[in-house]
Image (spheres, coloured by chain):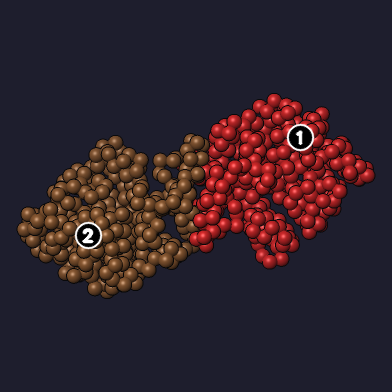
Chain colours: A red, B brown
Amino acid sequence: MIAVLSGGVGAARLLLALEDVLDPSEVTAVVNVGDDLVLHGLTICPDLDTITYTLARLNNDELGWGLRGESWRVMDELDALGGQAWFRLGDRDLATHLYRSQRLAEGATKAEVAEELARHHGVAQRLLPVTNDLVSTVFHTTTGVLSFQDYFVRHHHSIPVTSIDIEGAAAARPAPGVLDVLREAERIVIAPSNPLISIDPILQIPGVRDILRQRRDAVIAVSPIINGAAIKGPADRLLLELGHDVSCVGVAQFYREVCGTFVMDVTDANLAEAISNFDMKVRITTTIMSNPEHARALAREVLA
Amino acid sequence: MIAVLSGGVGAARLLLALEDVLDPSEVTAVVNVGDDLVLHGLTICPDLDTITYTLARLNNDELGWGLRGESWRVMDELDALGGQAWFRLGDRDLATHLYRSQRLAEGATKAEVAEELARHHGVAQRLLPVTNDLVSTVFHTTTGVLSFQDYFVRHHHSIPVTSIDIEGAAAARPAPGVLDVLREAERIVIAPSNPLISIDPILQIPGVRDILRQRRDAVIAVSPIINGAAIKGPADRLLLELGHDVSCVGVAQFYREVCGTFVMDVTDANLAEAISNFDMKVRITTTIMSNPEHARALAREVLA
């Protein structure tokens, strides 16, 4: 069994590619919940939903998020009412959030709801939120403290960040099964997600970092930084603002304590030696999943 | 200024007719919130919404509830997910509930949200929920305790009721302005709404009944029962099950303490004497608002 520490889009692509090279029932995604939010009374889990939709082959490739064949009747009406329409929730997508919110109100856990939604959509991989407890990634910025989606969506991650807090992480309990999965997995893959805001909120849940440290030789991370730039999102910018090296070396350094093998892009081959100095094995391949063939090759590489 | 104690559809029709015979800014609807619910994380206020939509001329006449030009994308998806789709929330209607839920989460009161929605829709009458506090009408039935919408919508008000509780009413505070409106109104109209589940949850809010008792001569009620049957909904059935006379006499008796004038339908003229015995003035007219002309005539009658 393979465990994959997962953020949103980058992780979803890798998980999808893994289905081509491994029985999906052999894969458990341990998913970040630090960017979950409650908006309009609805509990929204962007990373879980992105993965579910992607593995269900329902993801919207044009938008890069959400569901295909989406419509926007509710958002258009909400916008007309003067409501908060900056976080775009399509009509189909809203059904997911209504379903989750009602199930949570009935006493189900986030993990149970994730499993129900995955099952409904025919997703064969196991999707486990890292915790059922409330964990909130918040950004201290030059204009004050911002919630994740305020920073990310409302302000298009364009405001300088001075520090990041994963509120609630220290007191959160891992969701049932998470630590067992991490203990028992043949390999633990750190997906090419944002290290600071997708993976760190997973590592900060009590027990997770300790297990990875103990199992460092079984942990393999894929760099989300290629040639000094993030494939998507603000990882490069955040690395810079928070004093890390803006390269795959900066990412490897961030993971050095918990990860024994690092997968970097061929473009960055000249940086391999710097990463070897962290006592990491280095694998060099094409890490950008620009087509299914490259994605499959990357999936094979993390399993090799 | 005229105050109108209001439930949903029947009250909305009377309020609409009042606009033809009185400057709308002279009317304040004091609205029941006992059938409000939280579903899918959303706070839904059926009576406030029915009145707002009706006065905005946006009500769906075909369905008898909700908004015209409605679509059902979210509900269809929710239904497919196996979610609770029995309480039909249209896409346009959902925007109202998202808006309200978010504003409540931000600290606005139900009354403030009602005013914002009314203003957005160009409603000139003042709409005041009787309280901003949580009040829940619950039904004790032969099959156990049911929430309002469980009884009303899910079970189509088809289960025998043994008693009704307005939970939270005794501890609820009237919304700001409610008692002032009732003290100062030239006339207080009790709309032809269900006495037991639309009007009683208003009367049970501390202070309301006392003021009406003191101002009994200014209070005029319109019977929602004609010829022993409710115009709409289970008022007749509930009157029977809870030991009241199933006629406008039963309604008048229910209101006798707080109401000095009773408007009954011509069909029931033979019952006028029985109602006079409650020390009530009786007015006989066409109370069914089957067309705008009849509705206007009724509106004139309650103002006369």
Kindly identify the residue that appears in the image at 79 percent across and 45 percent down. A224
Q: Distance from label 2 to label 1 (Cα)?
A: 69 Å
The picture quadrant where one finds residue A119 is top right
CA neighbours of label 1 inside 10 A, class few (<14), some (14 to 19), many (20+): some
Kindly identify the residue that appears in the image at 31 percent across and 67 percent down. B19
Identity of the residue furthest to the top in this view: A23
Residue at disc 2, secondary structure:
helix
Kindly identify the residue that appears in the image at 51 percent across and 40 percent down. B77
The picture quadrant where one finds residue B124 is bottom left
Q: Position of residue A20 (x, y in %)?
A: 73, 28
On screen, residue B2 versus residue B107, left or right, reads left
For badge 1, the amino acid type reads Pro
Location of mark 1 (residue): A292
Task: Please identify the quadrant where the C terminus of chain B is shown.
Answer: bottom left
Q: Nearer the viewer, residue A246 or B281?
A: B281
Q: Chain of mark 1?
A: A
Location of mark 2 (residue): B294
Q: Is residue A133 visible?
A: no
